[in-house]
Image (spheres, rainbow, N blue to C red):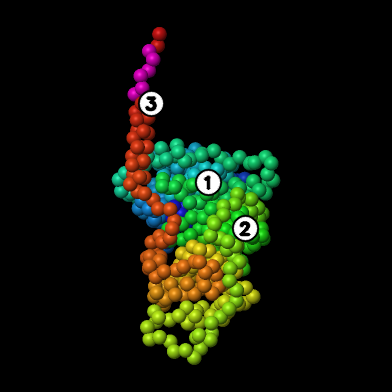
Amino acid sequence: MKTMTRLLSGLALSLAALALCPSLEARAAGTSASDAQLVQQGKYLAIAGDCMACHTAHGGKPFAGGLALASPLGDIYSTNITPSKTAGIGNYTLEQFTRALRAGVRADGAHLYPAMPYTSYAQVSDADVKALYAYFMHGVAPVDTRAPETKLPFPFDIRLAMAGWNLLFLDDQPYKPVPDKGELWNRGAYLVRGLAHCSACHTPRNTLMAEDASQDLGGAYVGPWYAPNITSDANSGLGGWSEQEIIEYLSTGHTAKAQASGPMMEAIDFSLRHLSNNDLKAIAVYLKSVPAIHEAADTKAVFDWGSASDKLDTVRGAAWPSNPDQMTGAQLYDAHCASCHQAQAQGSFKGGLPALFHNTATGRLQTNNLVLTILDGIHLPAQGNGVVMPGFRDVMSDAQVATLGNYLMQAYGNPAGKVTAEQVAALRKGAPAGPGPQVDLVLVARVGLVIAGLVLLLILYLIFRPRRRRA
């Protein structure tokens, strides 16, 4: 569910990494019980916001920044948000921290790019912002290492243009509870729209990279991955899920209907599974109420395709081709999948290994996630990068992955879904592949320059405007 690719794409927060080190414990020893409680509250909120997902480089120190976030405009490097006074946010006041979080403006006045989901964080309450500030100032170890500077090509390097973008697309008002909704629903809306920033990945974007509100949570391509429809639609979204199934998925990454992989598994592994049962239930209640967005191609629920079957008669006793790329889908399935998912794809270990029919992995027309899961498997990075499913990137060719993917879709899923060798090759390289919205960089550049020009003119006018002489 959560930025523009890695954001967007994007998302991880380790409790182990967040554990207070001895020096932090010593620092906290002199604080009052109320201050310590505020720090702990901020820690929980930072987990809910998945802050470490973007602000910790691979192998780097927690919150020290330096992670390259791929975007259509170029790599955007996350910043150091430790309390370092030389490289981080140690000199930020609460007001400056609030402005960065909600409006995307740093203490020095420079604008952040919306790879930082401040358009969602804008909804965070004053009390929660204060708790987050307390945590980052007193519960995080300072790291005196500067993150690399983001250098986008002209005109995208004109950060002032973001002021115009914000005028068009930023609602900087904190979330206001809806009076005729219950407390649980409002808590879910607050989390989904704000800290959890689900729309950052699950809502498609327009040509200016702003979220399309008319398609809120209706599914979107985020780099090579597809963040699916999570509205209340019975076929395309979560309408056919129970609240308990949603809670189970968010807390474990696994249900009979679906299994998380890629960025969503990271978001669950580092963030969502650590939320309280009440907060997970609140999210489930809210998602079940989100206005339905139906995809016409989904003629039945995406988790309701396929049935148990096998083609063992075509495999056993048959001579395998000398060219592995000419193996059939049944042969590839028997060689690589059947030992875990069983001969008829019914799964095993009482659901521990899922069935491949009646499963969203094979029920959606968008097959990118299926291909990427075959290539890279499923891992639990917060738990020692534990392997849930091995990847076959180094074992199978593009042609073989395409053959296997099409076999899975035809035998156990939505037969209208297709996989091509060209698609596999692109996804293997990490390139976007699919009918997702394309960014018109020329249009973005032109509009960006116009907005930047208007903002500059406004600033010049405010500085040099004629003043009435006093009588």
- Residue at horizontal 64%, vertical 50%? 289
Q: Where is residue 255 in the image (x, y as percent from the top left)?
A: 61, 66
Secondary structure under tag 2 reads loop
Residue at the bottom extreme? 317
Residue 234, which numbered label?
2
Instruction: Pick whichever of labels 3 and 2 is earlier in the sequence.
Output: 2
Q: What stretch is highlighted in magenta?
A: 463-469
Residue at the top extreme? 471
> Which residue type does callout 3 highlight?
Leu
**Is 29 in front, or is 433?**
433
- Residue at horizontal 45%, vertical 37%? 167
> Which residue type does callout 1 highlight?
Ser
How many neighbours does mark 1 have within 10 angstroms: few (below 14), some (14-19), or many (20 or more)?
few
Instruction: Pick whichever of labels 3 and 1 is earlier in the sequence.
Output: 1
When the figure is inspected, residue 251 is found, relative to residue 212, above or below; the finding is below
Identify the residue position indicated by label 3 in the image.
462
In this orientation, does residue 421 appear? yes
Secondary structure under tag 1 reads helix
**Is 53 in front, or is 285?**
285
Cα separation between marks 3 and 1: 35 Å
Cα separation between marks 3 and 2: 53 Å
> Which residue type does callout 2 highlight?
Ala
Look at the magenta stretch and give its main secondary structure. Answer: loop
Q: Position of residue 324 (x, y in %)?
A: 39, 82
Quadrant containing the N terminus in the rendered view: bottom right
Cα separation between marks 1 and 2: 18 Å
Quadrant containing the C terminus in the rendered view: top left
Q: Where is residue 377 in the image (x, y as percent from the top left)?
A: 48, 70
Residue 214, which numbered label?
1
How many neighbours does mark 3 have within 10 angstroms: few (below 14), some (14-19), or many (20 or more)?
few
